[in-house]
Structure formats: C-alpha cells, structure tokens
Amino acid sequence: MSIAFVDLKRQFQALENDIRSAIDGILDHTQFIMGPELGRFEEALSDYTGVKHAIGCSSGTDALLIPLMTLGLKPGDAVFTPTFTFIATAEVISFLGATPVFVDIDPATFNLDPELLRESVEKVKMEGRLTPRAVIPVDLFGLPADYEAIQNVADEYGLFVLEDAAQSFGGVSNGRKAGSFGQAAGTSFFPAKPLGAYGDGGAIFTNDDDLAEQARSILFHGKGGHKYENVRIGINGRLDTFQAAILLVKLAAFPAELEKRQEIAERYTDGLKDHVKTPAIPEGYSSAWAYYSVLSDHRESILKGLNEAGIPTAIYYPKPLHLQKAFSQLDYRAGDFPVSESASKRIFSLPMHPYLSDEEIDFIIEQVKASV
C-alpha cells in the first residue's frame, strides 16, 4: 500500500477542472502581480475568519514579520514565544534586532503555557535588560492557543499579541476562527498546510485599520499613494495572482476538507488512544489538524515499524528552538524548558490529509499498534 504523508496529487485530481480554469483566466488577462483574484481572495478570507482586514502576502514568515515591522521593534526589546515550534516564529524577532524570549508549552496541547508566559515576563522585567514588547503564541498542529489567558497576561503588561496561525487556519476556539486573535495574526499557505497554495504564500489578519494600511505599504516596498512613492522601508512581500486564484478554488473546498480531517483524527484517536498519547482538544476548541501528532516512549520502534510498512512519518520538532545553534547567543541550556524537551524526544506525526481512505487509516492504526 502506497500512502502519502500529505497527498496533494489526490487533491489536485479532485479540483483539477476549477484550478485549470482559474489559471487560464490569469493567462487571459496577464495581471500576474496584484491581479483581481488577489482582491477576491482577500475578501473571501475576511469573510471566512470574521476579521476586517485580510492581506495576502508572500509567505507565512512574512505574515509574521510584517506586523512586527509596524511595531518598530529594536535592540533591547523582548518578544515572547514558545520554544517548541518552527524557527520562522522566532527568526522574525531576531531579524528585526529584538530578542526572542522562549517559553515552555502546555504538555496537553503543545501550545504556549500562559502561566509560564506570565513568569517569563516578570523575570524579564525584574532583570531590567530587556523591554517586554510582544508575544507570539503558536497554534501548533492546528489547535488555537489559549488566547483568553494569553490576552489577560498581555493586557496586564502591555504586550502586543501576534497570533501565529501558520498551522491553524480553519481551527476554532469558543466560536472564533483562528486568525482572529490578538492585534494581528499571520497564517501560511505553504503547500502542505490545511489550506495550501502551489508555492509559498501567506496572509495577515487584523481589525486595526492603521496596522492594515502600514502592512499593505510594507509588503509593497513601503509604497505610499503610488508605486514610486516610498513612505517607509518595506519588503517585496506580495502574494502573486496565480497563488491567490488557486487558493480561491481551494478555499471553496476547504470546509468539506476540514470535516474529513476531523473524521480522520477521530478515527486515529479511537484506534490509538490505548497505545500512544493522542492529541488533547479542550472543550470549545476544534483543530484544523495540520498534523496528527502523538507521543510515545517507544517512538523509535514505532517509526521503524511504520517505515518498513511503507508509511511515511515526520517529527515536529526534533530540537526545540532554545537548543538550536542559531540562538546559541541567548545562552539557553538543556533542561531550561523540560516539557518541550520531553516532547521533542517522544513526538511523531502520522499521515494527515482529507483524501486518506478508510482502508489506509485502518492500515496505519494497525501498524502503529503492532510496532509499540
């Protein structure tokens, strides 16, 4: 049995006619940058998330970078973020000269622990070397973080909240869609994400009119009233028309795909809950199931068995950010964030996409059980 970790080919086959039609439309009008499909896609994103401004951009990384650029971060500023995430979350902080301050995660959800965030902010304030400015919670694996508790901490200390929704587009917390939390949010349309483009892409979400205006300027080289008026330093961060058109087609199919992801996750959980530690979804939340990640003290034997059976797996993330060479100047040590370090040694992800068949899911479950 041949199983894909994320099967983009099956998805394309299901949506092929609409995708080819969308691409042909662009070839007809030739507005390859800032074409009309981009505006339609942004409007559809705004409607879906319930956020006033949805701004397409070139990647999920730029979707985090650009809102931070509006803050005017500088050396000596501290931005808090979990250590158990992809490097892009902290990379943008360092890129702007600020200092990432890592925080450990909740062992049940893998998301930023709000109480540890509070402790970290207090510690930074007491030390007096850095100025707390912002926090970037990460909605890991598709599950929104605890934004009620995080916002309470942020309000107490005057922190800007930037939701990293790179993996959670489609997730819900107490009736609110991912992308609608904090002062701004960023998501990714990397091909393997729940809503994926055919290349890099991302979007910024905010209800703040001024932030939205600045973000649109920044992603177009800091332009003002026209292309050759530059009112600030910016970047080339636009979402191209082809990606917007493809994403429009995929967004129409997205709700049904989310339902299928939920069905697959439930099937995995029912079959594996007595054999590995399955994901915990708090009451009032739903995950976009970017990844179905489990914990086991027998990870190596399970991965070996799955590999021999032809089942692809992935480890997100084998080394927390505080132990990465890129952040060695911050002087963190092994043992500083025990929950994240433990998770990195035990976690692995199983195939997850809405085109998995029941036969494939059952085969994966049986192979995991046989390899424990």
Image (cartoon, rainbow, N blue to C red):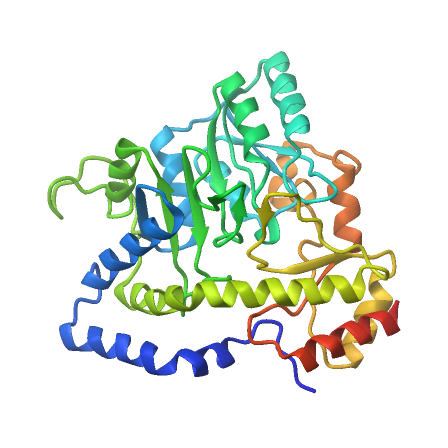
Query: Does 209 sit left or right of 86 as displayed?
Result: left
Q: Is residue 127 above or below residue 18?
A: above
Give the residue furthest to the bottom: 1
Q: Camera-side residue: 343 or 253?
A: 253
- What's the residue at 60%, 44% (across, down)? 326
Please provide percent x and percent y for residue 154: 52, 24
Where does the image place residue 30, in percent across and percent down from the top left? 16, 72
Is residue 268 left or right of 36 when viewed as pictured?
right
Q: Nearer the viewer, residue 69 or 16?
A: 16
Q: Is residue 116 above or below residue 235?
A: above
Image coordinates for residue 248, horizontal then vertical, percent: 33, 65
Residue 158, horizontal then vertical, whole percent: 47, 19
Foreground residue, 302 or 352?
352
Write the residue at 49% across / 80% down. 9
Query: Which of the 4 quarters of the picture holds residue 315?
Result: bottom right
Which residue does the image show at 80% across and 64% down from the upper left?
272
Q: Nearer the viewer, residue 311 or 86?
A: 311
Q: Quadrant of the C terminus?
A: bottom right
341 displayed left or right of 112: right
Q: Residue at x 21, y 67 (%)?
A: 32
* 159 versus 104 height, above or below: above
* Image quadrant containing the N terminus: bottom right
Residue 196 figure quarter: bottom left
Q: Is residue 192 visible?
A: no
Q: Is residue 188 visible?
A: yes
